[in-house]
Image: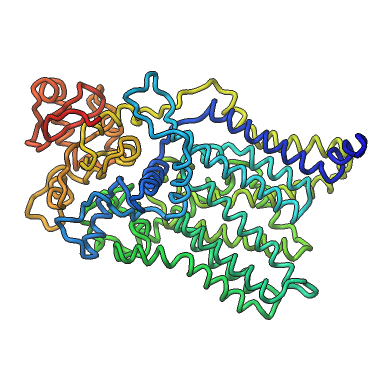
Amino acid sequence: MHIQEFIHKYSEGAGSRLVKLALVFFVMVGLAVWYDAAAFKNLSTIEGMDAAQVARNIGEGRGFTTDFVRPFSLHLLKQHGATNEGVLKDNHPDLAQAPLYPALLAVALKAMPFKMPDLEKVKNFSVYAPDLWIAGFNQLLFLIAVWQLWRLGRRLFDEPVAWVSAGVFAGADLFWRFSVSGQSTMLLVVLLLALVDVLARLEPQTREGASWSEGKLLLAAALVGLLTGLLGLTRYSFAWLIIPVGFFLAALVTPRRVAMVAAAAAAFLAVMSPWVARNMAVSGTLFGTAGYALVQETPFYPGLELERTLNPDFTTVEGGQIWTKTLAGAREILEKELPRLGGSWVTAFFLVSLMMPFRNPTLQKLRWFIVGSLVLMIVVQAAGRTGLSKESPEVNTENHLVALAPLLFLFGTSLFFVLLDQFGAQAVAFRTFAMGLLVMVAAAPLMFSLLMPVRTALVYPPYYPPLIQEKANWLQKNDALMADFPWATAWYGHRQSVWLSLKHREDASLKRRNDFYAFTELGKPIRALYLSARTLKTIETRTLESWVQREGREEWEPFVQDWETFALVGVYLFREVPTGFPLRQAPFGPLPELFLTESERSAVK
């Protein structure tokens, strides 16, 4: 091959696309390295650490078990017939998470080129290496999603729309924040884009003159159902997408549409049923604790209180309370979240594009599929919100709409090009400038994050992994502790951790006890109590104002107030604990945390 032909091939010919894709790959990798160096933080959300410790258990051969024990999951096990004395076991079944993301994360953790670190040997601690590895895994999924969006844009529109929409997506600061959160959002995006890609290929093949056979159409419909099932196994709420999927298939112009809907439904049920059957066998519920999200954030179970409840009373919850919660949540979504969905104003282009008809029937049907999914997920998100949305606003697993944002970017970008054509902007130089300007302005928040001075990766208070691991090592491997941030002690400390009970002490004659002492009847003693800076962060000012707003101070206030009074003299000098609490030893000195054990012991090595 002559040198001129080689240059032409990779500059303007068939190889130019390969060069561009390679360039984008290296840009994304470089951006990920820059982001992790400038803005990475260790895991800081409940869901991120929860998924990580379940994945580690899977990798260790313990199955879908969790060291983060919710009192409410103990209640479900008791209700399903587990004996009261043996409900708190060493391998507690996970009843909170959908299984696909922890399973894939387990593979990623097994591929880690280093072991879980012993932080007692680390000096000048900053970054917890497994947290960074998890971020890298999710950033790989992010890269795949950017490529998927580019391919989808090229198929549905043209290359300029594909490149700009992919650039807007790759430059969205919110998605980079999700990539380091340890949550399942990036996997959701990958699966959702794959689903839309199959729908985009399927629709033209149902029109007259198409080349696909009936068998291939049914196979594609089954693939649609399979992908929808995988979405449901990544996050239970996304199983609802089988409804707009069914409507999309039923609206196809083909006499085979009934068979296609049936094939999709059969594949969906085949994927979801084994895990639902497992939940039923273990807890008697379809979706474990996640199935009770409707009840959470109602007046009787505000915040995350239900998950800390060992003996709940659902007779206090009325349908009107759930309806009010849903309406209030939907209004907040429409007012605050939808206009800036995905953390980008490009979403507004999509909303405006709804007034523009498409001549291409595939685009028209896909847009209504996206709109239908958006409306459905607004209702699902509003009805299913819990205290997790307050714990970490925007970056949480209850932000379902964000998974649809890349599709909104794609259709919104198409309107941008229509507007360029309407203004007569045909000059190549001007169009290139306008495209670059759109991507740069959309990526401005990310640029500000990258250009800010390098910040610490620590999320303290309350998460300081060496301190958590040091305290956890005070217990034996199979011991259980009670903590106000059990997701952290489970992940960093690798100890079975029960969420802080609703109350410190109640009348022993009560039928529905939710105090610390009720856990002594569950077959496994609580060997330590760990109250972190999450609860006690205001000791110096002698106020519990922050706890009033977050945890319900009336339940543990007497204990904490007594501890504050005797913190230095009583606990740390004379080893005395107020109120006759059974955990009486305080092996660590005065800190903005409280760690009590039942007896003196040497730290486990």
Q: In which quarter of the image is the N terminus?
A: top right
Q: In this view, does 581 lie to the left or right of 237?
A: left
The vertical placement of 314 against 471, above or below, is below
Does residue 381 appear in this view?
Answer: no
Picture coordinates of residue 399, whole percent (x, y): 49, 49
- Residue furthest to the bottom in view is 255
Q: Is residue 397 left or right of residue 501?
A: right
Between 29 and 331, the residue placed more toward the observer is 29
Q: Quadrant of the C terminus?
A: top left
| Visual colour scheme | rainbow
Picture coordinates of residue 347, whole percent (x, y): 64, 47
Between 60 and 296, the residue placed more toward the observer is 60
At 48% across and 60% down in the image, what residue appears?
232
Picture coordinates of residue 588, whole percent (x, y): 20, 24
Q: In this view, does 560 lie to the left or right of 203?
A: left
The vertical placement of 232 against 185, above or below, is below
At 10% across and 55% down in the image, what residue appears?
510
Picture coordinates of residue 75, whole percent (x, y): 23, 57
Does residue 241 appear in this view?
Answer: yes
At 50% across and 52% down in the image, what residue appears?
400
| Count of numbered circles on the image | 0
At 44% across and 51% down in the image, what residue appears?
103
Q: In this view, does 551 lie to the left or right of 46?
A: left
**Residue 293: which quarter of the image?**
bottom left
Between 446 and 28, the residue placed more toward the observer is 28
